[in-house]
Image: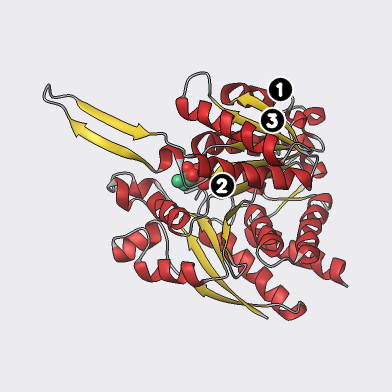
Amino acid sequence: MTQNLLLLPGDGIGPEVMAEVERLIAWFNAKAHTKFETTHDLVGGASYDKHGLPITEAAMKKALEADAVLFGAVGGPKYASVPYDKRPEAGLLRLRKDLGLFANLRPALCFDALKESSTLKPEIVAGLDIMIVRELTGGVYFGEPRGITNLPNGERRAVDTQVYATHEIHRIARVAFELARLRRNKVASAEKHNVMTSGLLWKEEVTKLHAAEYKDVELTHILADNCAMQLVRNPKQFDVIVTDNLFGDILSDEAAQLTGSIGMLPSASLGARDANGKQRALYEPIHGSAPDIAGQGKANPIANILSFAMCLRYSFAMKKEAGLVERAVSAVLDQGLRTPDIMQPGMRQIGTSEMGSAIRAALDKLAA
Ligand code: IPM
Ligand code: MG
């Protein structure tokens, strides 16, 4: 079996952390039965610099054809004055929309070795294992009308539209309920039904679907602002959190910090399965391009490496191999090796490529 991967490293630290994933792919090609073939293309600022667009039609075509897309990071201060639709971020949003990647899975898992490096007390985060399921192709990110208009009185006016239809709510809630069944069987649905009509619809539709098909799963509704507070107060009360595009963006960054560093967290963005069982998918670390440390070999490649582990699990059903990667990361952290973002007293600080090598060395041992 050969699987085709499209690699879109992007901007800033994207290429550095992607290089470690490529070395990991080479490791798997040498050891495992499945062979990965990789092609590369530009996205974000890198694509804008060369083509004047954050993603080209040719790159989109490759993404649509690939078995899975591995994405690094996009953006940077250099592009601050680029028009909105040509910004680096627009490339990522187009990928999500055109590939139909409505379900964004963002696990927040606290490795035991890192419980001291969170800004929260270790007892609050030790053993943390939350799955945030973020709706990714709807809501205010894509709603129409949107835009800035000039008013007759000389002022300007901006509009964004938060919009959800029943089917969008049902399909994302379904993903959350199904995942919960494989975990601790609890779903918290976060919205603002007290203020937003889209929040009210969200709550009603999640409730309906739950009553019709998922009564065995424990469902709670939580206001998104309260959810933000509960995440720092007592994050371990949560198992799966399902929420819309914008709240998911915010809550997942917050959850990331619980685990010690945003440099640790992977994500999977999945579409619906087609008649042939094929499911479009894109995997990316949830961190950004970190222009302040780009090119210095300091970036933590773990989020991207764990994103590849999610790719093994969700796109290729390679559960055993995914588990191996996750255990290798854990082993390296247990050895006291740390990139600067997760550095703690008494540990050894290393760079991006040393972290990648250490993880592959741990894999060699685990697979032996
Ligand atoms: C994320 C990012 C993106 C988002 C940006 C880069 C467009 O913050 O994936 O969380 O807002 O969705
Ligand atoms: Mg974000």
Q: Nearer the viewer, residue 172 or 250?
A: 172
Precedes in sequence: disc 2 or disc 1: 1
Taking the view exactly as shown, the residue that stands out farthest to the top is 194
The answer to whether any part of residue 362 appears in the image is yes
Distance, label 2 to label 1, CA atoms, is 23 Å
Per the image, the residue denoted by label 1 is 233
Q: Disc 3 vs disc 1: which is toward the camera?
A: 1
Which residue does the image show at 81% across and 40% down from the upper left? 184
| Closest to the observer, 250 or 353 | 250
Residue annotated with mark 3: 119
Q: Is residue 60 left or right of residue 219?
A: left
Amino acid at pointer 1: Arg
Element type at mark 2: loop
Disc nearer the start of the sequence (3/2) = 3
Q: Position of residue 202 (x, y in %)?
A: 54, 32
Query: Disc 1 beta carbon < 8 A from ligand 2?
Result: no
Which amino acid is tagged 3?
Thr
Q: Which residue is mark 2?
A: 287
